[in-house]
Image (tube, rainbow, N blue to C red):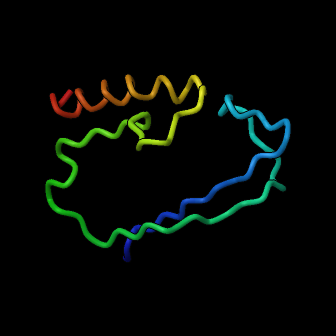
Amino acid sequence: TGPAQFELKLILAEEGDPLLDPSLQWPDNRPRVTLGRLSIDSVAASACDRLNFDPNVLSKGIAASDDPVLRLRSAAYAISFGKRLSGR
């Protein structure tokens, strides 16, 4: 009934927290910081027809971690994008 809203939150790691295994959950007492909010109240009819998100295409000065799951996402997202374009 209203805009779609998303908050970007950062959970601050502490010494010893695993940084390269997304299957391991950190304790609930880690500090959290809200970095911003995205509010979408309209979209163009063809806004995403030929758009592929790749989490490893990063701005200069930002590098991906060595998380193996993150490294595999580029290929998986490209396959998904190709299937969407082909209608399969």
- Observer-nearest of 7 and 86: 7
Residue 34 located left or right of residue 55: right
Residue 43 point in image, percent of width and height: 23, 64
Identified at 57% across, 64% down, the residue is 35
The quadrant in which residue 73 appears is: top left
Residue 72 point in image, percent of width and height: 47, 23
Q: Say above or below: 21 vs 8.
A: above
Residue 8 located left or right of residue 2: right
Q: Say above or below: 77 vs 62.
A: above
Identified at 34% across, 40% down, the residue is 53
The quadrant in which residue 47 appears is: bottom left
Identified at 78% across, 59% down, the residue is 31
Quadrant placement of the N terminus: bottom left
Quadrant placement of the C terminus: top left
- Observer-nearest of 33 and 25: 33
Residue 82 point in image, percent of width and height: 23, 27
